[in-house]
Amino acid sequence: MEFLHDLTIKKLHLGLLTKKFTAVEVTQAFFRHIKNRDGEIGAYLSLNEEQAIRTAEETDIQIAKNDAPIALLAGVPIAIKDNILVEKLPATAGSKMLESYRASYSATVIKKIDEAKGVILGKTNMDEFAMGSSTENSAFQKTKNPHDTQRVPGGSSGGSAAAVSATLAVAALGSDTGGSIRQPAAFCGVVGLKPTYGAVSRHGVIAMASSLDQIGPLTKTVEDAKILFDVIKGKDTYDATSTQYPNNKNPGNATEAVKKIRVGIPKEYFIEGLENAVSDAVQKVIRDFKGLQVSFEEVSLPHTPHALSCYYIIMPAEVSANLARFDGIRYARLSTNEPIRAGKSALETAYLSQRACGFGAETQRRILLGTFVLSSGYHDAYYGKAQKVRALITRDFKEVFKKVDVLLAPTTPTRAFAVGEKSNDPLAMYLSDIFTIPANLAGLPAISIPVKAEEGLPIGFQLIGKHFHEDDLLNLGMAYESLYAPTVQKD
């Protein structure tokens, strides 16, 4: 199965239908490749080999019977970020606090993948509770960038991005709270889509910041991202924030569709500190789009400079509330003989010892910060004000989208940085998400796409769209990829 690295969802589907290979053969080949390569990359925390083979067998039986249409996702090997519940599989969220936890039910997105007969290979590594931009904050291992194992894959969905990039899966699911799908996608040279807030159910996802979290696909191509997104999107009765996805009737031909799309270039995203290689690559992308007759104009999002500080007040506040449930009782994992401290009950001692040892440094930092900004006397000064700034950032986007349909910008200010380079400097690490955070604050869809024909480390460009207008982003992305599609020569 040497052709694994060329497999996309569409190619795999056609190969199954034409009997070029079976779903079981493909699945077994992926597990062999994982066992040979993942020791170097560290993308997976756990594998799901037996169940994956059984699912693949079901697809092969269905194809052999030829009694019903085969879903595009049937037999496709998929990796799942370890904060998304898959029944009976570990769900650690990259934390010692959940080291021994196994999910008692599956997330809604997993049920939809199961219905489509997607093959779940295993659970991928991540920054603890999705808090990080490098996948160095995992309690279990550090994932490496497949393009250069001395560099990080990004985070927090670094394991999922690395799995797709290293051909350890055809596609993957990640979660994006402030850029955690798009930033690792850019670093690893894959496509990463953060859908509109509410477009995909969050039921069965271990929450980090509930008003910001969103589940989305990481894939090799924009077309694959669309296929996987179409499977997982839609309203869910178990998630009150989910919405029935509207049916936007855009033309089927992406190259023709993009001629009607107006693209804005936000000047606030081209700032000091943007790496020259990234800036040059994005300018090249703009020239490519102009060749497709896409129209551009410069626009302004004046409150963008406040997005990072706004995010790092709202997000920790929600973290402190969501992680309060991990108190060492229901999700106990540590056995401790710590003596009861003076003036403290056995219960309080248990709480303190479990949370102190179960959470890593970055998680503790954000819990403390969030608890502080929500505390009496500080709530209005910090959290309340941050929510007002969030409203201004959202209003900026609404005003700009009266003039243009999509925004184009860099995904990250730099290419992948070295392992350990920013580990001891949280502020420098936080700046990795400076271009991705605004879309989360406003709940907008955004996608990172690799810049084509670039040598060296991957660079991603970002498209941001109107609420529930993922089709605009996907059509632009597919039209861009078509420029670099290999020409098929006829005999």
Image (spheres, rainbow, N blue to C red):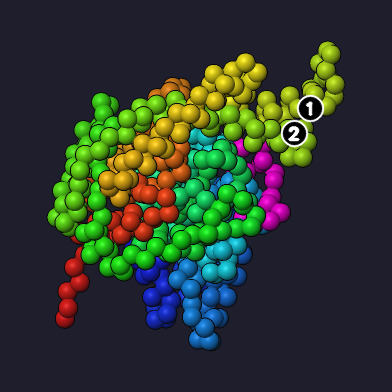
The residue positioned 48% from the left and 77% from the top of the image is 70
Q: Residues within 10 Å of mark 2 (few under 14, many from 20)?
A: many
Question: In which quadrant of the rendered view does residue 374 lie?
Answer: top right
The residue positioned 61% from the left and 44% from the top of the image is 206
Question: In which quadrant of the rendered view does residue 316 lie?
Answer: top right
Amino acid type indicated by mark 2: Gly
Q: Position of residue 51 (x, y in %)?
A: 61, 65
In this rendering, the count of numbered labels is 2
The answer to whether marks 1 and 2 mark residues whose Cβ atoms lie closer than 8 Å is yes
Marks 1 and 2, Cα distance to the nearest angstrom?
A: 7 Å
The residue positioned 30% from the left and 50% from the top of the image is 405
Residue 262 relative to residue 238: left or right: left
Residue at the spot of label 1: 350
What numbered label is drawn on residue 270?
none
The residue positioned 79% from the left and 27% from the top of the image is 350
Q: Position of residue 215 (x, y in %)?
A: 51, 50
Start and end of the magenta stretch?
Answer: 92-107
Q: Nearer the viewer, residue 340 or 236?
A: 236
Q: Is residue 339 above or below residue 197?
A: above
Q: Residues within 10 Å of mark 1 (few under 14, many from 20)?
A: many
Residue 453: in sight, yes or no? no
What numbered label is drawn on residue 328?
2
Q: Quadrant of the N terminus?
A: bottom left
Q: Is residue 68 magenta?
A: no
* Main SS class of the magenta portion in the image: loop
Residue 105 relative to residue 212: left or right: right
